[in-house]
Image (tube, rainbow, N blue to C red):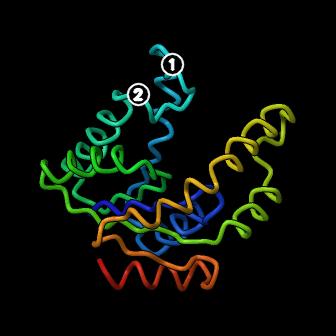
Amino acid sequence: MIVWINGAFGAGKTTLAEELRRRLPDALSFDPEHIGFLLRVSAPPAETGDFQDLPAWRKLTAEFAITLHREYGRHLITPMTLVEPTYREEVFKLLAAADVPLRHVFLDVPADELRRRIEAQVMDPYNEEADARIREFRLGNVDRCVAARAALPADALVLQADRHTPEELADQVLATL
């Protein structure tokens, strides 16, 4: 099964993914951001600068996940903010069409807590300019990511990530697999 961990930047997706990997040592990790990095050096950029706006990113993300699922037959842990409803539906429909089971987890965190977490994070310790750019991008998307909660499909597992430890969140996810 693919465990897609969704939510705003700063919600704890990577931390939850690490906890799940600790508990599911045979699981594979897949970060779709790497496909975005590949496209940035291999294809014309999206006008917006966001690689998720590239149809190729959405198609390649789904195809890569499908391939990993089919080739290895293991859980695939995928932490990735995917809050644009049409993009999420596009990727998830491609997975469903390939008969790939999906557990969509959404980490819900209030906007003020997300901003606090993002301000405290070091994004790029070697490049202050890049660190500031990443922080600005993440802070600029807080409201959009929080609002995405209202448009989630009914089968999404919504977890209050500001009220539970990563271990407790992992317990909740594992109980549904």
Q: Which residue is drawn at 29% across and 77% down?
A: 177
Give the secondary structure at mark 2.
loop
Residue 163 relative to residue 121: left or right: left
Horizontal arrangement in the rendering, residue 131 relative to residue 39 (left or right): right
Sequence-wise first label, 2 or 1: 1
Tag 1's secondary structure? loop
Residue 120 in the image: x percent, y percent?
A: 82, 59
Q: Name which residue type carries label 2.
A: Leu
**For the residue carrying disc 1, how many other residues have a C-alpha within 10 Å: few (<14), some (14-19), or many (20+)?**
some
Question: In this figure, what is the number of numbered marks?
Answer: 2
Query: Residue 105 versus residue 139: which sits nearer the camera?
Result: 139
Q: In which quarter of the image is residue 43?
A: top left
The N terminus lies in quadrant:
bottom left
Up/down of 49 relative to 132, above or below? above
69 or 169, nearer to the observer: 169
Q: Position of residue 154 (x, y in %)?
A: 29, 72
| x 12%, y 55%: residue | 99
Residue 47 x/y as whole percent: 52, 20
The residue most toward the right is 128
> Could you tell whether 124 is left or right of 162 in the image?
right
Three-letter residue code for mark 1: Pro
Residue drawn where x is 64% and y is 55% of the image: 142
Residue in front for this viewpoint, 122 or 155: 155
> Does the CB distance between marks 2 and 1 fall below 8 Å?
yes
Q: Taking 46 as reference, is 149 above or below it? A: below
Q: Which residue bears the numbered disc 1? A: 45
Q: Which mark is residue 128?
A: none
- Residue assigned mark 2: 54
Percent of width and height locating residue 61: 35, 39
